[in-house]
């Protein structure tokens, strides 16, 4: 079994469609194009033996008072290819990308109810501080 991870960028919009089964919602070509053309947005995809297995998306965040960091937005792996190393391979490649960009950390939000994510992030070297975090979402479409 061979896992291959690639970084996608401008012009790879149609290639993203091959990984549609790993995403939560249907892909939108214009949103995909905007994402891939933004230099601070990063999309990595993984194949297992040539079959589309999953993706990870991340955003480089800049601060005026500290080093840049990567926000790991999401990892998705198609159901029948889970637990075969795709998520780990993408996390390793995301770490390489973050170092190339001069990022100090990668951070991600998850919850205890997602044991696959808890295991993947822990095995990738992530440390959970044990705190219960709260996320507020402000719906900008509501008004």
Image (cartoon, rainbow, N blue to C red):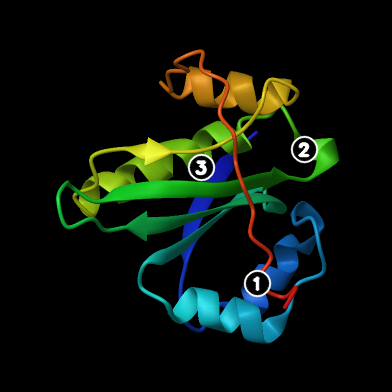
129 is higher (above) or lower (below) than 10: above
63 is higher (above) or lower (below) than 83: below
Nearer to the camera, 102 or 92: 102
71 is higher (above) or lower (below) than 33: above
Density class for disc 1 (Cα within 10 Å; few <14, some 14-19, many ≥20) is few
37 is higher (above) or lower (below) than 71: below
Q: Residue at x 14, y 50 (%)?
A: 65
The residue indicated by pointer 1 is 140
Q: Quadrant of the N terminus?
A: top right
Q: Quadrant of the C terminus?
A: bottom right
The x, y position of residue 104, in whole percent, is: 23, 40
Can residue 48 be seen at all in this image of the molecule?
no
Gap between marks 2 and 1 measured at Cα: 35 Å
The residue indicated by pointer 2 is 81
Secondary structure, mark 3, is: helix
| Left/right of residue 112 with respect to residue 24 in the rendered view | left
Can residue 36 be seen at all in this image of the molecule?
yes
The residue indicated by pointer 3 is 90
Density class for disc 3 (Cα within 10 Å; few <14, some 14-19, many ≥20) is many
The x, y position of residue 113, in whole percent, is: 75, 23
| Left/right of residue 47 with respect to residue 121 in the rendered view | right
Nearer to the camera, 25 or 4: 25
Density class for disc 2 (Cα within 10 Å; few <14, some 14-19, many ≥20) is some
Q: Residue at x 68, y 29 (%)?
A: 84
């Amino acid at each position: 079994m061979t896992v291959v991870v690639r970084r996608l960028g401008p012009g790879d919009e149609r290639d993203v469609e091959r990984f549609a089964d790993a995403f939560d919602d249907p892909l939108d070509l214009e949103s995909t194009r905007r994402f891939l053309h933004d230099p601070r947005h990063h999309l990595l995809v993984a194949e297992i033996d040539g079959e589309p297995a999953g993706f990870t998306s991340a955003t480089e965040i800049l601060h005026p008072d500290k080093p840049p960091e990567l926000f790991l937005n999401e990892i998705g792996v198609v159901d029948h290819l889970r637990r075969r190393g795709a998520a780990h391979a993408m996390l390793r490649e995301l770490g390489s990308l973050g170092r190339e960009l001069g990022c100090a950390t990668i951070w991600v939000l998850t919850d205890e109810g997602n044991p696959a994510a808890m295991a993947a992030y822990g095995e990738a070297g992530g440390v959970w501080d044990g705190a219960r975090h709260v996320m507020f979402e402000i719906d900008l479409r509501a008004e």
